[in-house]
Image: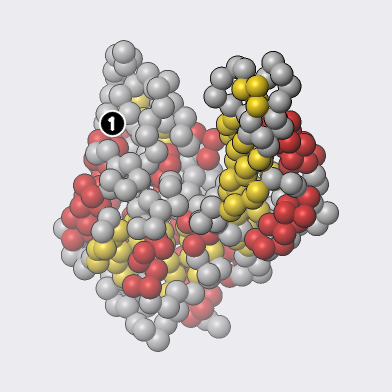
Amino acid sequence: MYLQQERLVRPEEHPDHHLFYNIIFLLKELISTPSFSGEESFTATLIQCFLQNRGVETHRKLHNIWAFNRFYDPDKPTILLNSHHDTVKPNIQYTRNPFHPLIIGDKLYGLGSNDAGGCLVSLLATFLHFYERHDLAYNLCYAATAEEETSGENGLKLILPELGHLDFAIVGEPTLMNLAVAERGLMVLDCVATGKAGHAAREEGDNAIYKTLKDIEWFSNFVFPKVSDTLGPVKMSVTTINAGSQHNIVPGTCSFTVDIRLTDAYTYDEVLQIIMQHVSCIVKPRDFYLKPSVIDTNHPVVQAGMMVGCNTYGSPTTSDQALLNIPSVKLGPGDSGRSHMSDEYIFISEIQHGIKVYTQILEILIFTLINT
């Protein structure tokens, strides 16, 4: 049973201006509309209509929506403003209806409110703030993308060729408006140890579980010598294991999965080669992997963020930054610790602050480039 609704505080009690009221209303509509990865058609339409109703020309490919500032100039550099509108599925510990947006005090509850609805609408408000400006030193490309939660093929990866030349990006993820100047990559390994099946009572066979234990111990204890200045050591975790069919049969195979969080200290191939030199099981990397991301702290977008009070850090989680081959930072309202939790929420004041900081950063970049 969901909790009874408490007193609803109207959005108009919070906003500083009409646009803020509208983006809060949009966020509530997005929460009300299920948008699991791969099933974001309706939320894509909501975002597209929101932009079109404000005179913005939009582009769409599957469930991805993007737009450029009105006075786009191909001779100017372009900043990508990107966040995602897909969500994970709600976990069973929800006590509130995950699809019923509810504002109580300063909190807006609902699935996707924090990850990454608050970032999505904050970047959208920022994009609209600059949309009609003639004096932009940069073009702005706003992209609301799909399938981030599953690293799918039909999200940001699908539309990157359509966006043209991009110089750097701000990726909207909940970071408490701290600047993630680096984030870990991800590699997943499917491993299989092979023995020989036999009758347990007669001590027949070669137990694949025992073989697996040796390799799992290595994954648990091995320390990669090189450590990233921003992201620390490479981390490996065995996360699933499967073997055996019944109590009296020695298992002939044992499979397990390893989650590896990469850093900029090693390439994908270097990590894989070190692993294969030390384990006896068959190792097969999954087809997808997310590369680590690092930006020079002297980059203008980092410097602008620091000027307005953002702290910098290395993020342990991955995002669509991994798909970008341009400098990027991860920055947004909300807290990563609330992502995927039950009764997910974001503070309305966090969204207000997010818009303010995004706007200040872009104002600094525009002013700096105009005067250099």
Say how the picture is coloured: secondary structure
Q: Is residue 1 visible?
A: yes
Residue with the mark numbered 1: 99
Question: In this view, which residue lies farthest toward the left?
Answer: 53
Q: Residue at x 28, y 47 (%)?
A: 40
Q: Is residue 21 above or below residue 138?
A: above
Compared across the picture, whether 37 is left or right of 32 comes to: right
* Residue 132 on image: x %, y %: 28, 70
Task: Answer few, some or many: residues within 10 Å of disc 1's Cα (few below 14, many 20 plus, some between 14 and 19).
Answer: some
> Compared with residue 225, is residue 369 higher up or lower down, i.e. above or below?
below
Answer whether residue 347 is visible to the viewer in this image. no
On screen, residue 248 versus residue 265, left or right, reads: left
Amino acid at pointer 1: Phe
Position of residue 270 relative to residue 30, above or below, is below
Q: Quadrant of residue 190?
A: top right
**Element type at mark 1:** loop
> Image point 28% across, 45% down: which residue?
39
